[in-house]
């Protein structure tokens, strides 16, 4: 190993000595002289360019150090020059990128250049806290709030202790809802619900259109509807009725037990099913069943498939015949045939034995594909009243489904014997004739059905019953 110091060490020591001497002038207030001397250090390093290039990482830090001193003196252009020299020697010098960025931040209309420098630093270290914080601050000043919020959140994810920076920002900019939102989210994560609610409330005060903050407030205070109600009322005053209703219903979905809210929604929207349901449930819990039933009944009137009214009323009086009949009809009309059948059977158990009841039961059995049992039900009706045309028609339809065509034909004959212009009976007679390949009967039966109801013409074209005669001329002429 050779004796003595290397050339690089000598140049570095000389530069450091010059910097230290200049610092004394800077501290003593000799600003002009200090600027001149720092420039002299730069000239010296430029003269020793070959030596500097042999140890770029080391000399990159020296240039960075000089740049910081220029920055402190307010000489931003010289500072930028030094940071660029530093980065030319070592492009991975994160401190130089950060210092260059902060210098641009201090210069007028140079924010975009600052962002580029912060980006370079973050490319080298994506979790660099100084870069994240200061880039977010710059974006905030540029009114690029969503990007700033994203970086602030990343900063907190990297180190939750960085919330201290957000606290300071809030104190400095108390009218910024985005900063309050960060405060609220942080308190919420920490389980500090009261503080989170106060912060979210501040967000809403500053930005009444922030629906997410309103939702958070409702989640934190499920019994306090004042925030979202205030927003809804404001929208009403502005004539934004659809948005107002959306807010009211959102509040209701989160607070179905809030009496004040339920009453207000019903005042504005008396036919709103969800509000009616909430009111009914509140009345029921309070032991006011008659009032609750009134609301459940209105829900059924608005939505016939909703059976809550009948279920609740029958809990009180399970043998109420009129209610059971009404429930059975409602279930049938809603297409809930199993439920309807159970209800009609319940009426039979209670001693009801009317023609209408057996007919309703038969209709349910038919819809459920229980054609044999349906026939029996309709036969009970006809035993009581042999002129019940609908029962003859329904029995015939069930027999047809069972492929008992001769018996079905007899039933349809009984229909037309009593009401000759029943189109559906003639159509079924035509279907049976087609099934039996009886073209002589097919023509008059189908012709009569079509003369009574022209809609059957299109139906016949695709009806599987006519599959075997579709190519027959007589059929083609009838449906043409």
Image (cartoon, rainbow, N blue to C red):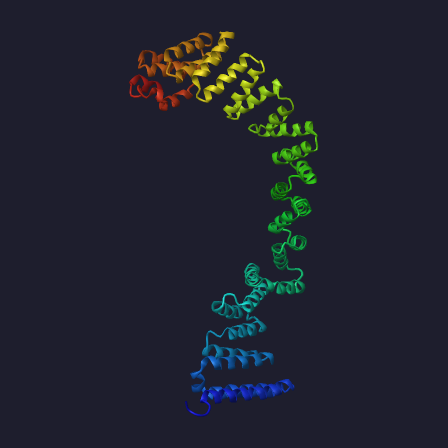
The structure residue drawn at horizontal position 66% and vertical position 32%, both measured from the top left corner, is: 280
Let me know if residue 79 appears in the view: yes
Q: How many labels does the image show?
A: 0
Q: Where is residue 199 in the image (x, y as percent from the top left)?
A: 66, 55
Picture quadrant where residue 254 is located: top right
Q: In which quarter of the image is the C terminus?
A: top left
Nearer to the camera, 213 or 167: 167
Let me know if residue 385 appears in the view: no
Q: Quadrant of the N terminus?
A: bottom left
Q: Position of residue 262 (x, y in %)?
A: 67, 38
The structure residue drawn at horizontal position 55% and vertical position 88%, both measured from the top left corner, is: 18
Give the answer, above or below, for where 79 lies relative to 336: below
Q: Where is residue 189 in the image (x, y as percent from the top left)?
A: 60, 55
The structure residue drawn at horizontal position 58% and vertical position 85%, both measured from the top left corner, is: 35
Nearer to the camera, 408 or 145: 408
Q: Position of residue 196 (x, y in %)?
A: 65, 54
Picture quadrant where residue 411 is located: top left
Query: Which residue appears farthest toward the bottom when viewing the image?
Result: 3
Give the answer, above or below, for where 126 lies relative to 10: above
Nearer to the camera, 358 or 350: 350
**In the rendered view, does 248 fall on the left or right side of 398?**
right
Picture quadrant where residue 456 is located: top left
């Amino acid at each position: 190993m050779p004796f003595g110091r290397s050339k690089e060490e000598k140049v570095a020591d000389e530069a450091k000595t010059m910097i230290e001497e200049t610092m004394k002038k800077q501290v003593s207030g000799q600003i002009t002289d200090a600027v001149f001397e720092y420039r002299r250090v730069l000239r010296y390093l430029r003269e020793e360019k070959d030596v500097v290039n042999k140890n770029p990482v080391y000399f990159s830090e020296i240039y960075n150090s000089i740049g910081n001193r220029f920055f402190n003196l307010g000489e931003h252009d010289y500072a930028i020059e030094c940071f660029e020299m530093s980065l030319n020697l070592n492009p991975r010098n994160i401190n130089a990128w950060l210092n260059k960025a902060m210098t641009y931040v201090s210069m007028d209309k140079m924010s975009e250049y600052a962002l580029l420098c912060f980006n370079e630093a973050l490319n080298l270290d994506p979790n660099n806290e100084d870069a994240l914080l200061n880039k977010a601050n710059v974006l905030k000043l540029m009114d690029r709030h969503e990007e700033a919020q994203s970086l602030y959140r990343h900063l907190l994810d990297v180190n939750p202790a960085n919330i201290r920076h957000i606290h300071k920002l809030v104190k400095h900019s108390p009218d910024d809802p985005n900063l309050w939102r960060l405060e609220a989210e942080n308190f919420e994560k920490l389980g500090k619900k009261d503080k989170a609610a106060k912060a979210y409330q501040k967000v809403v005060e500053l930005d009444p259109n922030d629906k997410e903050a309103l939702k958070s407030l409702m989640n934190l205070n499920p019994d306090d509807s004042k925030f979202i109600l205030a927003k809804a009322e404001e929208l009403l005053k502005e004539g934004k009725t659809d948005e107002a209703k959306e807010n009211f219903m959102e509040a209701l979905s989160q607070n179905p037990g809030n009496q004040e809210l339920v009453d207000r929604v019903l005042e504005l929207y008396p036919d709103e099913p969800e509000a009616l349901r909430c009111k009914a449930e509140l009345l029921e819990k309070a032991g006011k069943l008659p009032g609750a039933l009134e609301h459940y009944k209105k829900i059924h009137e608005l939505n016939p498939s909703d059976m809550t009214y009948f279920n609740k009323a029958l809990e009180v009086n399970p043998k109420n015949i009129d209610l059971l009949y009404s429930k059975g009809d409602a279930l049938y009309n809603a297409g809930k045939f199993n439920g309807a059948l159970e209800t009609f059977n319940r009426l039979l158990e209670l001693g009801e034995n009317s023609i209408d009841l057996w007919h309703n039961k038969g209709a349910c059995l038919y819809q459920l594909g229980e054609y044999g049992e349906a026939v029996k039900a309709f036969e009970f009706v006809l035993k009581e009243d042999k002129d019940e045309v609908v029962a003859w028609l329904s029995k015939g339809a069930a027999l047809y489904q069972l492929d008992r065509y001769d018996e079905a034909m007899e039933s349809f004959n009984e229909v037309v014997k009593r009401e000759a212009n029943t189109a559906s009976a003639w159509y079924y007679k035509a279907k049976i004739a087609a099934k039996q390949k009886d073209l002589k009967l097919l023509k008059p039966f189908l012709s009569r059905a079509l003369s009574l109801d022209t809609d059957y013409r299109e139906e016949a074209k695709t009806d599987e019953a006519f599959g075997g005669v579709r190519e027959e001329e007589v059929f083609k002429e009838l449906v043409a």
